[in-house]
């Protein structure tokens, strides 16, 4: 039996999959890369989301929310355990995150606590940020968890 790497899919990836094509060139490129990754590479991984992703997916425009929730169907959801809360706290306290970005610490914590190999995101401000990566990894390791490799879909594209 081949064990696939475990990948935690953060909400921004689901949002790009469900969104109408953007006129913004950067966002449009991210959307296309996300669709390409989803079509070509998602089968290479065991996909997971969390209660947070499901909650965020329900928000906003109802038509878009419906599309996001359809994408999430069949993807196992990881719970917010005491261990997740215990790791999210120092991630929030040791990172220069605004209060509105506390949820980002929970995405990282869910992925780390559940042994995800990767955390896939387009949130490059608070999650896939090279200036924060070392601190994220240190906090996870000090708490006894191996941090996931935080990356964007384009980092998996071979072409």
Image (cartoon, rainbow, N blue to C red):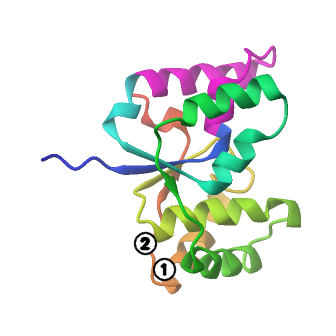
Please tell me in which quadrant of the rendered image residue 121 appears: top right
Span of residues in magenta = 13-39
Q: Which mark is residue 146?
A: 2
Q: Is residue 30 among what the camera can see?
A: no
Q: Label 2 crowding class (10 Å Cα cut-off): few <14, some 14-19, many 20+? A: some
Tag 1–tag 2 contact (CB < 8 Å): yes
Q: Nearer the viewer, residue 141 or 135?
A: 141
Q: Residue at x 54, y 22 (%)?
A: 35
- Please, what secondary structure does the residue beneath circle 1 have? helix
Q: Is residue 58 among what the camera can see?
A: yes
The x, y position of residue 44, in whole percent, is 32, 36
Measure the alpha-carbon separation of dots 1 and 2.
6 Å
Q: Residue at x 87, y 67 (%)?
A: 99
> Is 15 in the magenta?
yes
Work out whether mark 1 precedes mark 2 in sequence or the reverse, and give the earlier one. Answer: 1
Q: Nearer the viewer, residue 61 or 143?
A: 61
Kindly identify which residue carries mark 1: 141
Q: Nearer the viewer, residue 100 or 71?
A: 71
> Is 146 in the magenta?
no
Q: Label 1 crowding class (10 Å Cα cut-off): few <14, some 14-19, many 20+? A: few
Quarter containing the C terminus: top left
């Amino acid at each position: 039996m081949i064990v696939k790497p475990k990948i935690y899919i953060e909400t921004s990836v689901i949002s790009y999959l469900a969104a109408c094509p953007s006129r913004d060139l950067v966002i449009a490129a991210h959307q296309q890369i996300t669709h390409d990754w989803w079509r070509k590479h998602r089968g290479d991984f065991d996909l997971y989301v969390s209660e947070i992703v499901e909650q965020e997916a329900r928000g906003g425009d109802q038509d878009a929310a419906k599309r996001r929730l359809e994408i999430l169907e069949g993807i196992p959801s990881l719970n917010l355990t005491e261990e997740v809360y215990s790791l999210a706290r120092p991630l929030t306290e040791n990172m220069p995150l605004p209060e509105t970005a506390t949820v980002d610490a929970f995405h990282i914590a869910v992925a780390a606590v559940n042994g995800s190999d990767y955390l896939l995101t387009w949130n490059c401000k608070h999650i896939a940020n090279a200036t924060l990566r070392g601190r994220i990894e240190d906090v996870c390791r000090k708490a006894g968890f191996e941090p996931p490799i935080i990356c964007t879909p384009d980092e998996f594209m071979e072409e």
